[in-house]
Image (cartoon, helix red, strand yellow):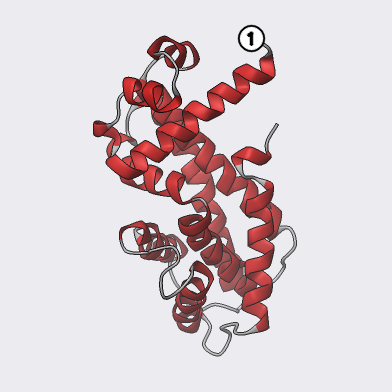
Amino acid sequence: MPATQRKSKRNEILLCFTELVARRGYDEVSIRDVAEALGISKGTVLHHFRSKEAILEQINNDYMRRRLAEARQYLAELDDPVDELQAFICQLMLAQQDDRAATVAFSREILRSAEEPAMAEVRRLREEFAAILVDILERGESAGTFATVNPRLTSVQIFGMINWAWTWFVPGGSMDAVEIADQFSRTVIGGLAPGAAREGAAAGRLSATVGAAMVAHRPEAEG
């Protein structure tokens, strides 16, 4: 089988597993389920991935690498901590909408599997991503833009506020991801830097910048 076909089949397995885990949960998905959904043999799945655990590790690894690549891309275009913080919040919410299955699959299973040895690289990537937010907060504080707070604790607050949105956010519902991100940003930034919350055109500009970064790093755009 040519390399491009092998890569395509591998990607199909990853995408199918992601969709099934997002819908059912990891414990309710088997290698056989993936094989049947794709119309291939169980052996073909195991040829690409030695186990179900290996597929989960790969989708979590890919998920965090996408988020890191997106953040690096849009942050390179910004130089204001307020804009950077709002863009970061927007990225987290857009992932809930535009990378929905992977976000739900990651969020459902990461707490349970995070300490497993196979997830060591995923843990490192999560820490690297969290450090980006801490750095934004630290620079904003040093510049006098944000109030003096504990940046690490504030980062936990922000992640906690958004990372569980998969349990209640409904894509296509009464508010889209950008509208929710804008509301969250006003709440967070209003507390850190009263009067600095961005509205209107600025919110649209930042969501467009983040959205472009997400499009550039979608799985189907790779290779």
User: Whole-percent x and y of residue 191?
Assistant: 45, 82
Q: Can residue 134 be seen in this view?
A: no
In the image, residue 28 sits, relative to residue 193, either above or below, namely: above
Which quadrant of the figure has residue 20? top left
Residue at (55, 60) in percent of width and height = 91
Q: Residues within 10 Å of mark 1 (few under 14, many from 20)?
A: few
Q: Quadrant of the N terminus?
A: top right
Q: Closer to the camera, 193 or 167?
A: 167
Residue at (75, 62) in percent of width and height = 77
Q: Is residue 114 visible?
A: yes
Q: Quadrant of the C terminus?
A: top right
Q: How many marks?
A: 1
User: Whole-percent x and y of residue 181?
Assistant: 49, 71
In the image, residue 141 sits, relative to residue 112, either above or below, namely: below
Residue at (47, 44) in percent of width and height = 126
Q: Is mark 1 on a helix, strand or loop?
A: loop
Q: Mark 1 points at which residue?
A: 1
Q: Closer to the camera, 155 or 74?
A: 74
- Callout 1 amino acid: Met
Residue located farthest toward the left when viewing the structure as drawn? 27
Residue at (29, 34) in percent of width and height = 26
Residue located farthest toward the bottom when viewing the structure as drawn? 195
Which quadrant of the figure has residue 111? top left
Horizontally, residue 129 falls left or right of residue 34, namely right
Horizontally, residue 138 falls left or right of residue 53, namely right
User: Whole-percent x and y of residue 100?
Assistant: 46, 51
Residue located farthest toward the front when viewing the structure as drawn? 39
User: Whole-percent x and y of residue 103?
Assistant: 43, 48
Q: Closer to the camera, 61 or 152?
A: 61
Horizontally, residue 135 falls left or right of residue 160, namely right
